[in-house]
Amino acid sequence: MPKKILIVGAGFFGAVCARELTDAGFECLVIERRDHIGGNCYTVFNPEAACHCHVYGPHIFHTDKEEVWNYICGFADFNHFVNRPKVFYRGNLYSFPINLFTLYQLFGVRTPGEGQAYLEKVRWPIQDPKNLEEWCLSQIGKEVYEIFIEGYTRKQWNRHPKELPVGIIKRLPIRLTFDDNYYGHQYQGIPIGGYTALFEKILKGIAVEPGVDFLQDREYWMKNRLLIIYTGALDEFFSYNLGPLEYRTLRFETELLPVADFQGNAVINFTEDSVPFTRIVEHKHFDLSFQEPETVITREYPNNWVPGDPPYYPVNTAESQERLEKYQILAGTEVPRVIFGGRLGAYRYFDMDQVIEAALKTSKIIIQANT
């Protein structure tokens, strides 16, 4: 008789585990609190604009991991979209991420040597940066930091950059070439037909029950299951017994506009404090589809999180990390049949390829341990 596994959450971690374990002969049931699959990657087709809208913010697939790329391409064809965001600050548009053209727009430097010389002149002599602000000042100086980082960071995290760890910003590239490809990874794109269709293929033939909250009837769902794979928030699983971890949530304001192209780009960041949203996303640019005379845009507003709100971004403060370690000990001692995974289960900011890689490894371990 197949061994029964319950998977809580139909995002990438849960869906990939479900696929791999089902193919290995396990009996998997996926339950999902929301009324749809795909987690935060969920897309909906808008016929007026003829594009797929990224309901919970833009998701651009990118990776240097050939194994992960080959795996995900087994479920979808990808277009050649490359993320080249722009920054709007006090009436001006700038190339982003920070590159040689950005420095040319600001200071007139035209060569890598001139760019390097300028940065060396404006960098602050901070040998061991202790926080996000110090790291930025040590790399790009005060003016570039204020235009591109300070206001955006305060809005995104509701904290001054002095209060945030260096790790949050180190993923942001700073280039002395004219390369404005945000990610710079070998494999990039958006699934043709949207992410929801991709998830439908991953979960084909697997029992999925949307609109079901595991935590509302935990005892029922725990019965008769070899294993539970849980991709919800770790602290919520334990009813916040040790106090909540810290997150940021988002509010999305979406409009259908009677123009073929609103801003000429998929993503424009608004980095000054006085603008309440962090970015405007124009969805048809992800699909590379411009045939319709209307377009859909979304303004993204970060908000303070309270229990009950969707948790989008873990806030990795020292206090939260200390509390996380206690929850992880609790998970290992009290619920050994539960595996926690994904961004919320691990309380870590993962890119999609990292989640898929982790799900493949987790599935392999489960298969080896039970066959």
Image (cartoon, rainbow, N blue to C red):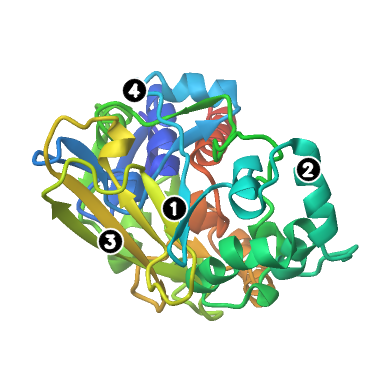
Give x and y (percent) for residue 52.
22, 39
Residue at which label 1 appears: 230
At label 2, counting other C-alpha atoms closer than 10 Å, the crowd grade (few under 14, some 14-19, many 20 or more) is: some
Give whichever of discs 2 and 3 has the lower sequence position.
2
Percent from the top left, x then y, of residue 305? 42, 75
Say whether disc 4 or disc 3 marks the residue closer to the N-terminus.
Answer: 4
> Which residue is disc 4 drawn over?
76
x 82%, y 65%: residue: 129
The one nearer the camera, 94 or 334, is: 94
Where does label 2 land, which residue? 114
Is disc 3 placed on a helix, strand or loop? loop
Q: Is residue 329 visible?
A: no
Q: Sequence order check: which comes first, mark 2 or mark 1?
A: 2
Seen from the viewer's position, the closer of residues 101 and 21 is: 101
- Reading the image, the residue beneath label 3 is 213
Q: Give the Cα separation between the discs numbered 2 and 4.
A: 44 Å
Does residue 117 appear anywhere in the picture? yes
Q: Secondary structure at mark 2?
A: helix
Q: Amino acid at mark 3?
A: Asp
Residue 164 x, y percent position in the rendering: 66, 71
Instruction: Tell me how far mark 1 sits from mark 4, CA to CA.
Output: 25 Å
Q: Amino acid at mark 2?
A: Glu
**How far separated are the C-alphas under marks 4 and 3?**
29 Å
| Front residue of 338 and 178 | 178
Identify the image quadrant of the N terminus.
top left
Residue 170: image location, x then y, percent: 69, 53
User: Residue at horizontal 12%, vertical 35%?
Assistant: 292
Labels 3 and 1: the sequence-earlier one: 3
Q: What amino acid type should be assigned to the residue bearing mark 4?
A: Ala
